[in-house]
Amino acid sequence: MARSAVIDRKTLETDIHLELNLDGTGKADIETGIGFLDHMLNSFAKHGFFDLVCKCHGDLYVDGHHTTEDIGIVLGQAIGEAVGDKKGIHRYGQYVLPMDEALVVCALDLCGRPYLGYDLRLPFEMVGSFSSELVKEFFYAVSYSAMMNLHIRELAGENTHHIIEASFKAFARALREAVDIDPHVNGVLSAKGKL
């Protein structure tokens, strides 16, 4: 049975419908109103082999903050719901991803305790209509909504687009590893017996 979730979230700032299948093939249907964010979510789905639908109508007349943060919240909720009781999963995931001159490492733990360690040094404030400071807001929202320990660190980079894209792809690959089933794991991978 596919591990999936459907989340709808409506506030005065955003109206989001999101579908996530952890056991997908990388298909994506993304409409956020922010071209660069669409590109990042498409990359996340493709490189993590997740099927992802994300439709968002946000208050972009203000800026992209509410849209980006709220999609992070909903994606985190979907990850948490889709992974379920976490029985049999690797739990941990890590990936070092190169993209041209950029090199980004992502490590995560689906431990049930939220934390974001973030160190991306983004040279430019904007990529298209997307504010680069929203990358941290997105990953913070994902980590806390999914109750995951998430670290993203830039090892090298000069181009803002490359650094951000490498971070989304590294996150996708690390999450893929963490949610994959490990035949060695009996129950959950924890000395406490619970995550």
Image: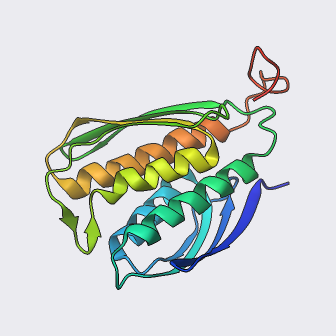
Residue drawn at x 34%, y 80% as measured from the top left: 62
Percent from the top left, x then y, of residue 163?
26, 49
Q: Which of 190 and 60 is in front in this view?
A: 60
Q: In this view, does 39 lie to the left or right of 29?
A: left
Percent from the top left, x then y, of residue 118?
36, 38
Query: Residue lying farthest top?
Result: 191
Color scheme of the displayed model: rainbow
Percent from the top left, x then y, of residue 120?
27, 42
Q: Which quarter of the rendering shows the N terminus?
A: bottom right
Percent from the top left, x then y, of residue 30?
51, 75
Residue drawn at x 67%, y 30% as measured from the top left: 90
Query: Residue lying farthest front?
Result: 12
Residue drawn at x 46%, y 77% as measured from the top left: 32
How many numbered discs sit on the rendered protein?
A: 0
Whether 135 is drawn above or below 116: the answer is below
Res. 12 image quadrant: bottom right
Q: Which of 86 and 13 is in front in this view?
A: 13
Q: In this view, does 56 lie to the left or right of 117?
A: right
Q: Is residue 189 left or right of residue 11?
A: right
Res. 129 image quadrant: bottom left
